[in-house]
Image (cartoon, rainbow, N blue to C red):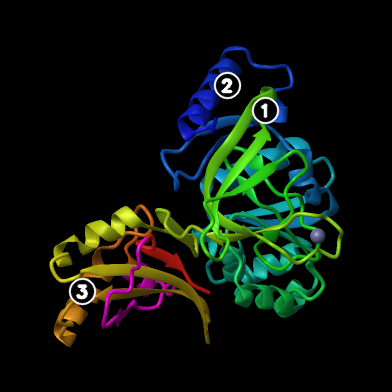
């Protein structure tokens, strides 16, 4: 029988209560973490620190950690504090508010050999780094977001001497993929030993929901847990010889997209577009990262089908309302993010006919 999220949440709650009531002697071997809350209500979980997840730290003398996410920053900081002895000797934890003039000099002084974090945030950190400092980086460790070809090229170009490590991890279940073998294209992973993946109800392209079966902590068996991502199996063999590999396709049909440290949520889009409902028979918001002369920026495109079409005045009003009232962080609207130079102004594309076929009525899409 499939394990649902309520079961995982109840289990996490029980473990946390027990952990607080009967603090184990080796408590420092555990982390208390909060999931991002992007799939559903956040889950607070206690988990054993995973040596292999953090082991790249031991190869580093000075590291930069940039997740643009408080819970991951804290988890990494606590782990580094308790579990690293000599290495890395210096770690700089960065958040979005730290990307200020002068950061480049600080990063030059730190001379990091490892950078770990969300790819989008690492691009933004890189925009502050001198070329020589980027060339000195030996390891890039990524987690948490989809890769794009543009990003792969960006990191290869700017960090020519770095070994890249990626993993597919879920907050509530830990690692799902093995540490990458170095041969697979972006967003492709081998399942971790002991993890069984199923692609549920695949469409004509073989893409379906990812279901995970694995034994999590305390020997609890999680069966066919719906992680919230879609994927397909790779048919090409991998040079490393591992028999199975899957490609994460994102969250089409799901309720949010993470982009550049912000969250585009379907409920928020629906709220903002509700006043235009009489005019919009169909709509979809497409999120992309685009390269500009001043670094990468986010771009939202509102693809709409409005029977009879919209005048340019109506289209402008729609775009202005969208930018002014769409919240993409708890405190920042799209307009604010445009002013801060993180996003470009949104675009509108009118479709002449209905474009949402049966079963394809998802309202968000990440485009490369
Ligand atoms: Zn491989």
Which badge, 2 or 1, comes first in the chain's sequence? Answer: 2
Q: Which of marks 1 and 3 is nearer the N terminus?
A: 1
User: What residue range appears in magenta?
Assistant: 335-358
Seen from the viewer's position, the closer of residues 320 and 78 is 320
Residue 235: quadrant of the picture: bottom right
Label 2 belongs to which residue? 15
The one nearer the camera, 194 or 156, is 194
Tell me: is circle 1 under 8 Å from ligand 1. Answer: no
Marks 3 and 2 in Cβ contact (< 8 Å): no
Residue 262 appears in the rendering: no
Residue at the (28%, 70%) spot, across then down: 323
The kind of secondary structure element at disc 2 is helix
Q: Is the C-beta separation of discs 2 and 1 under 8 Å? A: yes
Residue 55 location, x and y as percent? 80, 46
> Please, which residue is most extreme toward the front here?
204
Q: Nearer the viewer, mark 2 or mark 1?
A: 1
Q: Where is mark 3, residue-wise? A: 318
Q: Where is residue 357 in the image (x, y as percent from the top left)?
A: 35, 67
How packed mark 1 is, by other alpha carbons closer than 10 Å (few <14, some 14-19, many 20 or more), is: few
Q: For the residues marked 1 and 3, what is the alpha-carbon distance in whole angstroms?
A: 49 Å
CB within 8 Å, label 1 to label 3: no
Looking at mark 2, is its residue's CB closer than 8 Å to ligand 1?
A: no
Real-space CA distance between mark 2 and mark 1, rounded to the nearest whole angstrom: 10 Å
Q: Is residue 187 above or below residue 190?
A: below
């Amino acid at each position: 029988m499939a394990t649902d999220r309520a079961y995982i949440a109840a289990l996490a709650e029980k473990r946390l209560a027990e952990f607080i009531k009967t603090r184990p002697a080796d408590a420092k071997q555990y982390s208390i973490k909060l999931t991002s809350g992007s799939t559903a209500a956040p889950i607070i979980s206690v988990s054993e620190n995973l040596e292999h997840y953090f082991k790249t730290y031991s190869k580093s003398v000075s590291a930069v950690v940039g997740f643009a996410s408080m819970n991951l920053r804290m988890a990494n900081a606590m782990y580094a504090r308790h579990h690293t002895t000599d290495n890395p000797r210096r770690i700089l934890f960065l958040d979005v508010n730290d990307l200020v003039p002068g950061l480049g000099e600080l990063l030059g002084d730190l001379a990091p050999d490892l950078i770990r974090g969300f790819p989008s945030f690492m691009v933004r950190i890189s925009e502050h780094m001198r070329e020589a400092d980027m060339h000195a980086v030996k390891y890039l460790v990524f987690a948490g977001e989809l890769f794009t070809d543009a990003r792969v090229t960006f990191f290869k170009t700017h960090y020519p001497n770095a070994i890249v490590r990626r993993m597919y991890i879920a907050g509530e279940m830990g690692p799902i993929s093995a540490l990458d073998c170095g041969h697979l294209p972006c967003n492709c992973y081998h399942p971790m030993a002991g993890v069984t993946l199923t692609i549920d109800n695949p469409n004509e392209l073989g893409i379906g929901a990812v279901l995970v079966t694995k034994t999590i902590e305390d020997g609890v068996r999680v069966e066919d847990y719906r992680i919230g991502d879609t994927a397909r199996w790779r048919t090409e063999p991998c040079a490393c010889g591992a028999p199975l590999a899957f490609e994460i396709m994102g969250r089409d049909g799901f309720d949010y997209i993470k982009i550049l440290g912000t969250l585009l949520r379907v409920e928020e889009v629906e709220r903002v577009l509700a006043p235009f409902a009489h005019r919009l028979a169909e709509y979809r918001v497409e999120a992309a990262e685009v390269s500009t002369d001043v670094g990468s920026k986010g771009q939202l495109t509102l693809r709409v089908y409005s029977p009879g079409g919209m005048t340019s005045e109506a289209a402008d009003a729609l775009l202005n309302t969208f930018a002014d009232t769409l919240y993409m962080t708890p405190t920042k609207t799209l307009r604010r993010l445009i002013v801060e130079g993180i996003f470009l102004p949104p675009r509108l594309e009118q479709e002449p006919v209905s474009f949402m076929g049966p079963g394809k009525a998802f309202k968000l899409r990440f485009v490369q």
